[in-house]
Image (cartoon, helix red, strand yellow):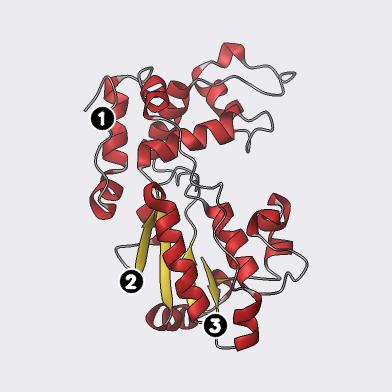
C-alpha cells in the first residue's frame, strides 16, 4: 500500500490490475519530475525498484499500526481490481511465457509435475497454462501464501477489514482512473503544485485487454474441475467486487 500526506490518499496495489501505470501516475502527481511530461515516460525500473520509487511515494508498511489506522480513517482510499480468471491468465503470460522468467516458478512446476524433464542445464521451461493452474490450486490446497500476482485480490487489500472509498475496475479502467486522478489533484493544497501536475493523465495505453476469444482459447485447455476449483479460490473476489463468471467455452 502507498500513501501521500499532501494528497491524503492510500492506494492498495493489486498486481495485474494496472499497478505499474498507477505507480507511474502517483509518482508524477508528486510534481517532482519537472523534466517529464507523462507517466509512461517513467521506466519500469524506476517504478518497481523501491530504491527509486521510495523517493517519491511512501509505503504504508513503514508506518506504525496506529499511524496506518489513522490514515485509513481520514484519507481517500482506493484500489483497482480485475476479473479473476483474466488476471490469472495475465499473470501466466507475464511470469511464465516471458523469456526473463519469474522467481523460478517454472522450475518449481516442472519439478512437481514433470520431474523427468528437469535438468540443471535448462535455463527456461515451457510450462503449459493447465500446469500453471494446477500449481496455483495445489499451492492453495497446501496452505501456502500465494504469489501476489495471483492471490485473491480481497486478501491483498483486506477489504473485509478495511474501508475503501473507491474500488475501480480494470474493465472500466480509463473512466474510473480519470475520476481518481481528478480527485487526487483536487486534494493538493499548494496551488503551484496543482499547476505543475494539471496536465498529468492516466497512461492512455494501459488497460488493453485480450479478446474474449483468446480467453476462451486458453481456458479451453484447462480441465473442468480445475475451473470449478478456481471459482472456489476466487469466490470472495467474485462476490465482493461484483464480477460474473465469464462465459467461456467449456464452462459456465
Mark with earlier residue (3, 2): 2
Spatial distance from mark 1 to mark 2, Cα to Cα?
31 Å
Provide the residue designation for mark 3: 188
Provide the residue designation for mark 2: 163
Where, quadrant-wise, is the C terminus in this rendering?
top left
Q: Is residue 55 visible?
A: yes
| In this rendering, the label closer to the viewer, 1 or 2 | 1
Instruction: Tell me what residue is drawn at x 54 percent, y 82 percent.
Output: 188
Residue 250 or residue 196, whichever sits in front: 196
Left of 47 or right of it: where is 235? left
Label placed on residue 247 = 1
Q: Is residue 142 visible?
A: no
Q: Position of residue 103 (x, y in %)?
A: 63, 38
Instruction: Tell me what residue is drawn at x 50 percent, y 49 percent.
Output: 15
| In this rendering, the label closer to the viewer, 3 or 1 | 3
Q: Position of residue 225 (x, y in %)?
A: 27, 23
Amino acid at each position: 500500500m502507498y500513501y501521500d500526506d499532501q494528497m491524503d490518499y492510500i492506494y492498495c496495489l493489486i498486481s495485474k490490475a494496472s499497478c505499474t501505470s498507477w505507480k507511474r501516475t502517483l509518482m508524477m502527481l508528486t510534481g517532482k519530475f519537472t523534466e517529464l511530461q507523462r507517466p509512461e515516460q517513467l521506466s519500469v525500473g524506476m517504478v518497481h525498484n523501491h530504491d527509486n520509487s521510495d523517493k517519491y511515494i511512501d509505503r504504508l508498511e513503514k508506518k506504525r499500526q496506529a499511524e496506518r489506522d489513522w490514515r485509513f480513517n481520514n484519507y481517500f482510499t482506493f484500489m483497482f481490481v480485475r476479473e479473476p480468471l483474466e488476471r490469472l491468465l495475465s499473470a501466466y503470460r507475464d511470469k511464465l511465457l516471458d523469456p526473463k522468467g519469474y522467481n523460478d516458478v517454472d522450475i518449481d512446476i516442472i519439478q512437481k509435475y514433470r520431474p523427468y524433464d528437469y535438468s540443471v542445464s535448462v535455463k527456461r521451461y515451457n510450462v503449459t497454462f493447465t500446469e500453471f493452474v494446477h500449481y496455483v490450486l495445489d499451492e492453495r490446497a497446501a496452505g501456502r501464501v500465494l504469489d501476489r500476482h495471483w492471490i485473491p485480490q480481497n486478501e491483498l487489500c483486506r477489504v473485509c477489514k478495511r474501508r475503501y472509498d473507491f474500488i475501480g475496475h480494470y474493465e472500466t479502467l480509463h473512466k474510473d482512473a480519470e475520476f481518481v486522478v481528478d480527485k487526487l489533484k483536487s486534494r493538493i493544497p499548494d496551488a503551484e503544485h496543482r499547476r505543475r501536475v494539471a496536465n498529468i493523465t492516466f497512461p492512455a495505453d494501459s488497460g488493453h485487454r485480450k479478446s474474449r476469444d483468446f480467453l476462451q482459447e486458453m481456458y479451453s485447455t484447462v480441465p473442468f474441475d480445475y475451473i470449478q476449483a478456481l471459482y472456489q479460490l476466487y469466490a470472495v473476489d467474485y462476490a465482493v467486487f461484483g464480477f460474473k463468471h465469464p462465459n467461456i467455452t467449456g464452462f459456465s
